[in-house]
């Protein structure tokens, strides 16, 4: 039985307390030293965070997409990297729960639910970003299964994930190209190599890596759902959840930037009065609060669409587009409110400014989001009011 709305509200409150009591006091040292947050990750496992998208009977902490987004938002309010530490994992679990065979579900979902098994997805390649149909990673049959060759890049949690959902071509000659794409569930132990770690502006503490697949052998049962050529459609479905998660990350960062700005504007005085009373600063606060509220409502709508079983690519794309642009704008405004202190590493504001751009390019760039939204508007005949 799924948790009630009261149960889900309690889950969100517990995560918020964890963020305030455990994450925020530790984040600055961890972030500035680019240290993997092992202790915090273990606490997240014990709280059931890694099982939020794993349904019964395989997991005990499955929640609605709306609750999943709110949990993500709270974690990102503390440190966006923590929300990223389980984002791809949650999408892989969702994909296996929705499309996997009974054997695949039994093999992976119980361990994914506890975080004993960590997962990530491998989509992006060095020569191509958002054009997933143009991927070059190829899986060829042999009598024992599949042999995978290719390179994937910008893979979050690559060193801490034992299971990788790899998007690859199982039929390179298929036309249209997306009909030749499948998802393969590849375990690190099959011989995947982490070829290098990628240095980043923000999103510290959690690794982003390049993965090399050189004659990596996987069993025939590794194809998600076993039916070939379904991978592109499956991944697009998974990215609906992924984009809701990225939107929630953006909202969490924006909330943190706004909260710090609101607090600072009441303490800092200039020309004999708190700076919030100066119209320019007050306008920043008013605009940020309004846009954060709008982004939350957009993301809630997208989550409710997904929970109802409807397509949510339009709604998730809108939420991700708006929330990510809003987060960067709010982070910049927080720096303006804080003045010189906003540029100092002694405060968290500069971290929000470095973390916010990731959501603009992650899970499909915002340029792609606009294309998705426009295409869906045409297909649906406009908006349904």
Image: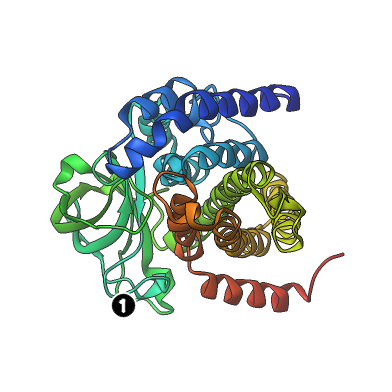
Give x and y (percent) for residue 382: 78, 75
Crowding around mark 1 (Cα neighbors within 10 Å: few <14, some 14 to 19, many 20+) is: few
Colour logic: rainbow
Residue furthest to the right: 385
The residue located at (26%, 61%) in the rendering is 152
For the residue pair 299 and 150, the one nearer the viewer reads as 299
Give x and y (percent) for residue 167: 35, 59
Give x and y (percent) for residue 209: 25, 54
Please state, as top left, top right, bottom left or bottom right, where the C terminus lies in the image.
Answer: bottom right
Q: Secondary structure at mark 1?
A: loop
The residue located at (37%, 65%) in the rendering is 181
The residue located at (48%, 51%) in the rendering is 341
- Is residue 50 in sight in this rendering? no
For the residue pair 141 and 87, the one nearer the viewer reads as 87
Splitting the image into 4 quarters, where does residue 93 fall? top left
91 relative to 234, above or below: above
In this rendering, the count of numbered labels is 1
The residue located at (58%, 60%) in the rendering is 336
Splitting the image into 4 quarters, where does residue 200 fall? bottom left
Please state, as top left, top right, bottom left or bottom right, where the N terminus lies in the image.
Answer: top right
Give x and y (percent) for residue 339: 54, 57
Splitting the image into 4 quarters, where does residue 371 fall? bottom right
From the image, tell me which residue sits under label 1. Answer: 173
Q: Residue 138 vs residue 71: left or right?
A: left
């Amino acid at each position: 039985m799924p948790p009630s709305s009261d149960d889900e509200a309690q889950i969100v409150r517990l995560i918020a307390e964890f963020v305030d009591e455990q994450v925020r006091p530790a984040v600055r040292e961890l972030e500035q030293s680019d240290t993997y947050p092992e202790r915090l990750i273990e606490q997240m496992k014990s709280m059931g965070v890694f099982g939020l998208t794993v349904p019964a009977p395989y997991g005990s902490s499955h929640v609605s997409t709306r609750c999943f987004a709110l949990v993500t938002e709270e974690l990102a309010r503390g440190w966006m990297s923590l929300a990223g530490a389980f984002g791809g994992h949650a999408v892989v679990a969702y994909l296996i729960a929705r499309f996997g065979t009974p054997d695949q579900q039994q093999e992976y979902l119980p361990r994914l639910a506890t975080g004993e098994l960590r997962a990530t997805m491998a989509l992006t390649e060095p020569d191509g970003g958002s054009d997933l149909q143009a991927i070059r990673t190829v899986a060829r049959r042999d009598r024992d299964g599949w042999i995978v060759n290719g390179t994937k890049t910008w893979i979050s949690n690559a060193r801490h994930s034992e299971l990788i959902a790899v998007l690859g071509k199982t039929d390179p000659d298929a036309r249209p190209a997306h009909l030749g794409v499948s998802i393969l569930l590849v375990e690190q132990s099959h011989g995947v190599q982490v070829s290098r770690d990628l240095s980043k502006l923000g999103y510290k503490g959690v690794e982003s890596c390049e993965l090399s697949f050189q004659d990596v052998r996987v069993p025939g049962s590794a194809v998600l759902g076993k039916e070939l050529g379904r991978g592109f459609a499956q991944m697009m479905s998974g990215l609906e959840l992924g984009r809701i998660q990225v939107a929630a990350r953006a909202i969490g960062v924006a909330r943190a930037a706004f909260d710090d700005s609101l607090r600072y504007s009441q303490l800092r005085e200039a020309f004999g009065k708190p700076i919030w009373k100066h119209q320019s600063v007050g306008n920043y606060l008013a605009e940020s609060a309004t846009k954060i509220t709008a982004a939350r409502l957009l993301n809630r709508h997208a989550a409710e669409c997904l929970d109802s079983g409807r397509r949510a690519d339009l709604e998730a794309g809108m939420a991700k587009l708006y929330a990510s642009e809003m987060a960067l704008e709010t982070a910049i405004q927080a720096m303006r409110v804080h003045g010189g202190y906003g540029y100092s590493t002694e405060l968290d504001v500069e971290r929000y400014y470095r973390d916010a751009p990731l959501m603009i390019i992650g899970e499909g760039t915002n340029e792609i989001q606009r294309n998705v939204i426009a295409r869906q508007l045409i297909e649906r005949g406009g908006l349904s009011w």
